[in-house]
Amino acid sequence: MGVVKIARRTFLIGTVAVAGGVAFGYYQYRRPLPNPLLDSLGTGEAAITPYVKIDANGVTLITPRADKGQGAYSIQAYLLAEELDVDPLNVNLSVGVPSKAYYNSRVMDEAFPFAATDDSAVANTVRGAGDVVTRMMGMQMTGGSSTVPDGYEKLRHAGAVARETLKEAAAVKTGVRRSQLTTEDAHVILPDGTRLSYTELAPIAAQTEPVTDVVLREPGQWRYLGKEIQRTDIVGKSTGREKYGIDVSMDNMLFATVRANPGFGGDMRGYDASAAEAMRGVKKIVPVTSGVGVVADNTWRAFRAAEAIEIDWGPGPYPATSAEMWDVLDAHIDEAYQDHRNKNVGDVETPLARGQEAVEAEYRLPYLAHAPLEPMNATVLLEDDRIDIWTGTQIPRFIENHVATLTGLAHDNIHIHVQPMGGSFGHRLEDTYVLQAVEIAKAMKGTPIKMTWSREEDMTHDYPRPMALAKARGKVKPGAVEACDLDIVCQSIATSWFGRLKAAPPGPDQTISTGAWDQPYDIPNYRVTGYRAPEMVPVSSWRSVAASGNGFIHEGFLDELIHAAGADPLEERIRLCNHNVSRKVLEAVGDMCSWSGFSLGENRGRGVAFVISFGVPVAEVVDVTDTPEGIRIDRVYVACDVGRVLDPINLEAQVTGGVIFGLGHAMNCELTYEDYAPQQTNYHAYEAMRLYQAPEIEVRALENLDQIRGIGEPGVPPAAPALANAIFAATGKRIRELPLNKQIQFV
Amino acid sequence: MQLTVNGQNYNVDVEDDMPLLWVLRDELGITGPKYGCGIAMCGACTVHIDGQAMRSCSVPAGQVDGSEVTTIEGLGSPEALHAVQAAWIEEQVAQCGYCQSGQIMAAAAFLSINPEPTDSDIDQAMSANLCRCGTYPRIRAAVKNAAAKLQGV
Ligand code: FES
Ligand code: FES
């Protein structure tokens, strides 16, 4: 076995002999990882790195990071293809089999107490430690806008190693030196123009020492990346052919659903299913954790039968009403519950004590559901010695662990087939629905069951974004912000989420104040403190995680201070900004909307907000009109910086989608609780934005950052505060509580 | 009951009140129409019934006995795209894509009765379909693109 160290981030690449061939793979540290491709290799097949496989069926690109709509499959394929010289629209694509070999080294970047703008040696050392942690946990996980930062080098490298090794194989076959060969469209080209297909070279490549000292192409040589490319899944998704988890079908399959305690996590004390059992098509009623599962011969029949079951619910493990939950937050915004204070510059108390003129405000954010359009579902077939699971998920490896515990099966016998997702926004970082389906499958051995949540079940078991309360104080002098002190309290996403993964991290959870403490401003006296409320409703990451809520608090209050100082909202942000790349983003958005010297006219208002999240600085300007029927959102300008734009069309899609997600939820979405259950159970009460409300959105992406970043989430956080700031500019009304439609109408 | 879906005849034995969506998906295995809300709020399940765009989650099977149903699969195929699908591909509308079967079916029916829509016609006609990924600006562009295609422009 040959092992060669490549690249900066200690990737190890090596070869393993297998029957009739060889496989190439990335390894971690001293211990080679199991390579999932080896299991399925047939004689004469060669697998080159876990990301490329070549056999009689042609070239297969393996794109392990899951696709929930953000274009992950597509960009992973293009990263591989750019170096391998194949056309992603003309080769096989596979999501592969979950494996530790597909660890995501970047997903934990934001879990450490350094701002993304902090490039100090200590910050990078600790982030390196995060890399170790994630590798060791075998985190094949999609999240944290990390697919591109994680794969940018790794995938191009895999493609290049495969290409050079295929050229070497051609050299062996023909006697022509490798340096005289070129590649094009899945062929090695000899100097005389002869074309040898990768497929015919694969068996020879399997016998060839891998070529690992490859040099990646310069961006100027790129054929796909940075250009207008077609998403690999666009045809399937435009013709109804794309198959999502909910579309899985197999012989003898039955359909199932679950009703679990709407007091999320509360007990199911007992039930009477006699009426349900008598209904047409009902095959079985199965108690599951916290609820009851129904198996029928049609999903609708299962839904109807589930509704017909009389269930005695225990109380939820948290306060019964939103009012009581607010009381809990109020009681914990107190020194005794301080979790961390990551920002403490100057001395906020001295200016605040001086004179009468402190600016004070209170901000409130509700629980928010992810509510992706495809409800949670999983198809499970349990047999004597193996289980197969088809589901859309961001965390296949965690599911494997949980299923091992639940079934007693060895990991080798648990097979997870990750499906394309009809959205997630973070919901599919959870696996409750999968485990329920497994519980049902245990009662249905040998029969595949497809378990689908009704929309109502989905909304009531969403693991929402936590509600939060902030108290803000600040001080200004004429023309300048002098002091800003933010106290933020909410429950810990990390405690809740890692708790469910049975891996609770010790210590503070900085996500309580992320999006506020880590912003690149030099306010002379500046303090941000996070307070920890006890666990209430189980919570999880919601597209852009903490930055969406805390960005609203921070950018709303900063806007208040700037107005109190009589300064210009954009100019003062630029003056305070201490991060060059971020400053350019602010300047760019000002340029796009002609900020200075431009008057919108009567009843109109313009607001700006800036948030850096996942290392991506984003500035947004929102223009609104105060019409007699309510606020109309006219236009949004967005400037961002991702270091390098790989897919301009998808970048624009992700940013505009993020803006609409941020605006829509700010306009009219919340989960409120009564008798432990959320009151919003379907889209009639949780609408977000509709097409007629969507503004024109203009996006400009800069490339000044010194490293590449992902854009699935960072467009979200500035949208809500920019909207609230615009409403203030148009109406003089400062709204500090979401959703905004509690206090103002939208048209 | 008798059902014609995408030109094929089917005989199904279901309750009269089973929504058409679940007849298509679970009885006939036609999965292009999606389940999103079940209460006519999202449009993911949109199909054409005798040429009209309808929310199949809220149409009881008993009402379509004898009708012609067209789903996204019957509108066009990757090899033979309908103009609306071609426009959706050109504009690269889809993100997760889960709403797009419904969006495309709504747009196709709308353009067949209003071949030269104004911006506000498009806003009105397409606002009944939710997209959680926020693809609305590209849906607008794709509807205009499709209108031009259908006009042979
Ligand atoms: S599923 Fe029919 S409108 Fe939502
Ligand atoms: S593309 Fe995802 S819901 Fe519309």
Image: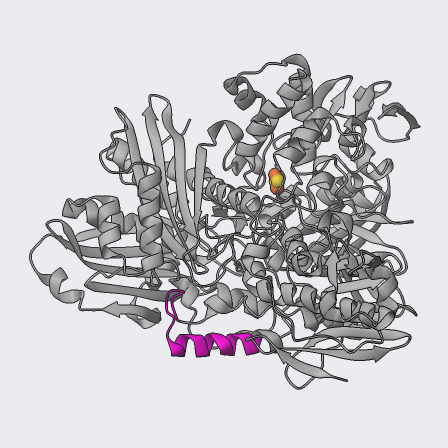
In this orientation, which residue lies closer to the viewer: B22 or A250? Answer: A250
Q: Quarter of the image for the C terminus of chain A: give it.
A: top left
Instruction: Locate residue B73 relative to residue A42 in the image: left or right.
Output: left
Look at the picture and state if A148 lies above or below B80: below
Image quadrant of ligand 2 equals top right
The quadrant of the rendering that contains the N terminus of chain A is bottom right
Residue B54 in the image: x percent, y percent? 70, 23
- Is residue A550 highlighted in magenta? no
Farthest residue toward the bottom? A30
Q: Main secondary structure of the magenta part?
A: helix
Query: What residue lies at 32% left-to-right and 63% top-to-bottom?
Result: A333
Q: Name the spot of residue A587 as percent of width and height, x first.
A: 31, 47
Give residue B132's quadrant in the image: top right
* Residues in magenta, as a range: A114-133
State the image coordinates of residue A90 (x, y, percent, origin top left): 77, 48
Q: Is residue A442 visible?
A: no
Q: Which residue is drawn at the image coordinates 53% and 16% (left, top)?
A: B118
Residue A176's spot in the image, x, y percent? 80, 69
Residue projecting furthest to the left: A355
What's the residue at 27%, 40% (across, down)?
A: A734
In the image, residue A131 lies in the stretch drawn in magenta? yes
Nearer the observer, A459 or B36 = B36
The answer to whether residue A574 is left or right of residue A176 is left
The answer to whether residue A401 is visible is: yes
